[in-house]
Image (tube, rainbow, N blue to C red):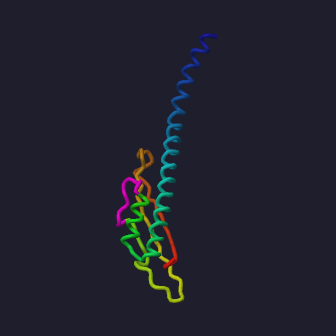
Amino acid sequence: MRDRLRSESGATAVEFALIVPLLIALVIGIAEFGRAFQVQGTLSAAAREGVRLMALQNDQAAARAAVRAAASSLDPAITDGQITITPSSCPQLNGGSTSVRLTIDYPMPYITGFFGTGLDLTGTGVMRCNG
């Protein structure tokens, strides 16, 4: 009986060695997904803030500053080259309804690099000009 228990202890170590890498990959995947979800929410909120300012004030510089302020927690920080505003200005409404769109393209680097270098995320906000 004792010999049988000793021979099974090696099987347990082998099973453990086979399962642990899968569990570690799962935990890393959960952490990376959670961070990507948080960054996507930040980008969406920043895009809404920027497009709101652009629609009300018709000022691209103020809209870009609002985006950078709303997404100040992101590392690396958002640059002006990652923010696209179309059309470039809100025309005065003459009975029509024109919308402005602000898009943020953000290359989010992974924390661990286990799944590659990073992920490209996009935040978009659309609002009718002049409120």
12 and 71: which is toward the camera: 71
Instruction: Tell me what residue is drawn at x 57 percent, y 14 percent.
Output: 6
Screen quadrant of the N terminus:
top right
Residue 21 in the image: x percent, y percent? Answer: 50, 36
13 lies left or right of 59: right
Q: Residue at x 52, y 45 (%)?
A: 30
Q: Is residue 6 magenta?
A: no
Does the magenta segment cover residue 78?
A: yes
Task: Judge whether 13 appears above or below 65 on screen.
Answer: above
Q: What residue appears at the point 44 percent right and 80 percent down from the top-left corner?
A: 90
Question: Who's the residue at 61% across and 14% down the image?
Answer: 4
- Would you place residue 13 above or below residue 57 in this image? above
Rendered location of residue 77, percent (x, y):
37, 57
Main SS of the magenta part reads: loop
**Left or right placement of residue 63 versus residue 24 in this view:** left
Please state which of residues 92 and 98 is positioned toward the viewer in this rendering.
Answer: 92
**Quadrant location of residue 81?**
bottom left
Q: Which residues are magenta?
A: 72-81
Q: Is residue 8 left or right of residue 50?
A: right
